[in-house]
């Protein structure tokens, strides 16, 4: 497990009318503030990675499809420096992933369906001074496999 990352299983309340899924509450361990809420999509075969924030904490939930979230810690002071982590999110595995500042992360859909990600970052996006760094999804310095091989 990467230091500071929290994977929180989500509660689903279901009855004969449908269901409600609680995502993030202000009394959750994973909650540390609210900046904005947004949804982003990703087409099958595409990888949206790697990016990280110096200040912002992300709270990621897959609300459509299934996705593989990748995380990489290269924080020199972290006990998990050099480690990678993979989390599968989606309807069959409803969970929230809290990504702390300075942890590289990204995602790709699993299967042939569009994946939709809900993010609740701790601070809003600053168009004048974006808190974001990027790396190539297949950067050889990050030991992570985006492709899921059948077996």
Image (spheres, rainbow, N blue to C red):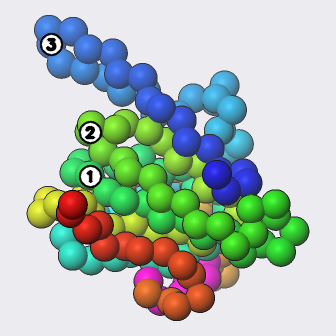
Please tell me how crowded label 1 is: few (under 14), some (14-19), or many (20+) other residues with Cα within 10 Å. Answer: many
Magenta segment's dominant SS is loop
> How many residues crowd mark 2 within 10 Å: few (<14), some (14–19), many (20+)?
few
Tags 2 and 1 touching, CB below 8 Å: yes
- Give the residue displayed 27% in from the left and 37% down from the top: 92
Q: Position of residue 142 (x, y in %)?
A: 56, 81
Q: Residue at x 26, y 52 (%)?
A: 66
Instruction: Tell me, yes or no, if residue 32 can be seen here.
Output: yes
Mark 2 vs mark 1, CA separation in Å = 7 Å
Position of 44 with respect to 27 (left or right) is: left
Residue 109 coordinates in the image, percent (x, y): 27, 63
State which tag comes first along the sequence, 2 or 1. Answer: 1
Magenta-tinted stretch:
132-137
Disc number lying in front (2 or 3): 2
Q: CA distance from mark 3 to mark 1?
A: 24 Å
Q: Which residue is mark 3?
A: 17
Q: Earlier in the sequence, mark 3 or mark 1?
A: 3
Spot occupied by residue 27 in the image (x, y as percentages of width and height): 66, 25
**What is the quadrant of residue 21 in the picture?**
top left
Q: Nearer the viewer, mark 3 or mark 1?
A: 1
Q: Residue at x 82, y 64 (%)?
A: 78
Count residues near mark 3 (Cα–Cα under 10 Å), then give few for <14, some for 14-19, many for 20+: few
Q: Is residue 34 visible?
A: no
Number of numbered tags placed on the structure image? 3
Q: Name the disc covering residue 91, or none.
A: 2
């Amino acid at each position: 497990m990467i230091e500071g990352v929290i994977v929180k299983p989500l509660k689903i309340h279901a009855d004969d009318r449908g269901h409600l899924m609680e995502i993030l509450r202000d009394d959750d361990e994973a909650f540390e503030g609210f900046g904005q809420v947004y949804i982003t999509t990703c087409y099958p075969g595409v990888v949206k990675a790697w990016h990280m924030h110096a200040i912002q904490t992300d709270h990621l939930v897959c609300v459509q499809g299934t996705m593989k979230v990748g995380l990489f810690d290269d924080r020199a002071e972290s006990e998990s420096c050099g480690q990678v982590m993979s989390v599968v999110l989606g309807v069959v595995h409803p969970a929230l992933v809290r990504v702390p500042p300075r942890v590289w992360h990204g995602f790709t859909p699993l299967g042939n369906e569009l994946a939709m990600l809900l993010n609740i970052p701790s601070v809003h996006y600053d168009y004048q001074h974006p808190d974001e760094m990027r790396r190539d999804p297949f950067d050889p310095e990050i030991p992570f496999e985006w492709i899921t091989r059948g077996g």
